[in-house]
Amino acid sequence: MASNDTKSSRRAASIESFKVMDLLKRARELEAAGCDVVHLEVGEPDFATAEPVAEAAIQAVRAGLTQYTPASGIPELRERIAAFYDQRYGVQISPEQVLVTPGASGALLLAFASLVDAGQRIMTSDPGYPCNRQFLHFLNASAQLVPTGPAEKFQLTNALIAEHWQPETRGVLLASPSNPTGTLVPVDEMQAIAQRVRQLGGQLIVDELYHGLTYGVDAMTALQVDPECFVVNSFSKYFGMTGWRLGWLVAPEGAIKVMERMAQNLFISPPTVSQYAALAAFTPQSLEIFEARRAAFEGRRDFLVQGLRDLGFAIPAMPEGAFYVYADASHLTDDSFAFCWSLLEENHIAVTPGADFGQFNASRYVRFSYTTRLDQIEKALQRLAQRIRG
């Protein structure tokens, strides 16, 4: 009888699980068994796709716009994205500098693949988005994790980059606002970092996925200080199109041509209907919807932060953007991984342990995502209070 066991490659076997997705899977199992789980784990807005965007998708399907597109995306969307940079940031880029991708994940994979050879490294902060490490591992490269804490708002700085640069370092990845902390890289620091990376002969890559979702402050694009940098963005967060799997990358035209060749082989093209839907994301009607949702996220942030502080959690860096609170839970546990699983199994609250985002002080921290309604956040805080206070 043939065995059903398939031997995995060493590369595949060494890929770590995305812990928040493991938690989500278990949360869904508990819900299927009749449990009422409060979801504060995944970074997915709970708002439905904006009506103008959904209607544009329906019209595209009815018009038969469902075939492959160019690997770089439909020209209309590349033009619309380029115009958006001028409108929002006063930065002029050519549509030829825009590569539309299957999610920001596709953009990050292409960016890394175009920059690193085997054995090279991309410097990034610890904590940081976990999948970046796995993308690099796929390429036989690695993430060079630099510990960052509250003093740096969990962000790389010019001084840290200068201190930790190594011969194998190929570039620097920043995230502003960041996941899991929601902090921004200050304008002067971004400028100094861009200058430093150029001097060291490296490439700056900036994850701007949460642009548009900032509170009391506007985020600058790195293109304002470094026109040669790579900028990754997505329709998932501010535009609320997670399941449509659409992102983009801005880079010098020569780099785009290289990545387009890779995209042709890896993806054929970005999702067609999603691209035509995304054209409607930039209309005044849609932007008005997104701005109202931003205000709702800000209210959720303020409510959650205050509630967590009342329960003894330290918030060492107030989130300025995204929809996450990176909270110090060391007054409750010295193992936040076990703590998060216990919260899910015993209290039916789903949150993400710091271990998903790196190694530095990971056992202290828990990430709360405020992508759910205020009444759900309040329910989670009540359950936390019952657990802590009895």
Image (cartoon, rainbow, N blue to C red):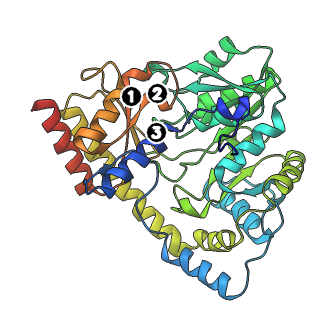
Q: Earlier in the sequence, mark 2 or mark 1?
A: 1
Residue that appears at 58% across and 73% down: 283
Number of numbered tags placed on the structure image: 3
Mark 3 touching mark 1, by CB under 8 A? Answer: no
Residue that mark 1 sits on: 337
Residue that mark 3 sits on: 182
Q: Residue furthest top?
A: 163
Indicate whether 135 appears above or below 170.
below
Q: Position of residue 2 (x, y in %)?
A: 70, 45
Q: How far separated are the C-alphas under marks 2 and 1?
A: 6 Å
Closer-to-camera residue (49/79): 49
Left or right of residue 357: residue 201: right
Q: Residues within 10 Å of mark 1 (few under 14, many from 20)?
A: many
Residue type at mark 2: give it.
Answer: Ala
Mark 2 touching mark 1, by CB under 8 A? Answer: yes
Q: Position of residue 133 (x, y in %)?
A: 64, 31
Q: How far separated are the C-alphas under marks 3 and 2?
A: 17 Å
Residue type at mark 3: give it.
Answer: Gly
- Residue 355 is labelled as 2
Residue that appears at 74% across and 33% down: 9
Q: Earlier in the sequence, mark 3 or mark 1?
A: 3
Residue type at mark 1: give it.
Answer: Phe
- Classify residue 327 by image quadrant: top left
Is residue 10 visible to us here?
yes
Q: Nearest to the eye among marks 3 and 2: give it.
A: 2
